[in-house]
Image: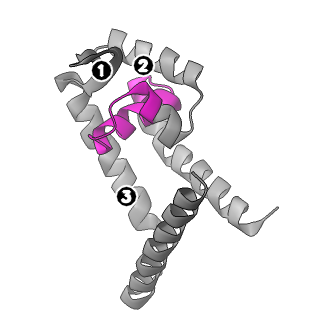
Amino acid sequence: MNPNMEFAIKTAQAYNAVCKPLCQELKLPQTAFDILMFLANNPDRRTASDIVEFRHIKANLVSMNVDRLVKEGYLERRAVAGDRRKTELLCTEKARPVIERGRAVQNAFFARLLTNTDEPTREAFFRTMEIIGKNLDDILKENA
């Protein structure tokens, strides 16, 4: 296996593992939790299409889990002004404590990833990630 793929897979597996206790407590599937956190953490991305595009979750899974989150009162749907075909997904007040706890899990996970690194290493890592991000943007523009 490509070491880069292995890193991405391990990261996803470890993230899911640390989220599992909270998801079990809330009786939410990991996918529903991921959708809720995506919407909370990306207020400029509010549609099911955004979730499919940026989180790479299959459309049928997004639809099923959004329906569940709406039914359970964590999300509400709102028509987009000027475009009746588009619907925004908004987190409700009921979702706030779930989001706060989810962010705490995410922050703890990220801090744990950086355990045993010193400040210069972290700075170099973040600089490298920024450069890679720009390179990825350039590749996407060139191939659009």
Identity of the residue drawn at 51% across and 33% down: 52
Whole-number angstrom distance, CA of label 1 to CA of label 2: 8 Å
Out of 125 and 108, give the one closest to the viewer. 125
Please report the bounds of the magenta region as a residue range.
24-50
Rendered image quadrant of residue 11: bottom right
Identity of the residue drawn at 31% across and 44% down: 41
Residue at the extreme top: 71
Q: Around disc 2, counting alpha carbons within 10 Å, would you say few (fewer than 14), some (14 to 19), or many (20 or more)? A: many
> Do labels 1 and 2 touch, CB within 8 Å?
yes
- Give the structural element (helix, strand or loop) at label 1: strand
Residue 111 in the image, given as x and y percentages of width and height: 39, 66
Specify which label sits upstream in the sequence, 1 or 2: 2
Task: Give the residue type at disc 2.
Answer: Val
Q: Around disc 1, counting alpha carbons within 10 Å, would you say few (fewer than 14), some (14 to 19), or many (20 or more)? A: many
Q: What residue does disc 1 label?
A: 75
Quarter of the image where the N terminus is located: bottom right
Residue 131 in the image, given as x and y percentages of width and height: 47, 76
Q: Is residue 26 visible?
A: yes
In-image side of 48 versus 2 (left or right): left
Out of 2 and 133, give the one closest to the viewer. 133
Specify which label sits upstream in the sequence, 2 or 3: 2
> Do labels 2 and 3 touch, CB within 8 Å?
no
Q: Is residue 23 visible?
A: no
Rendered image quadrant of residue 35: top left
- 71 versus 30 height, above or below: above
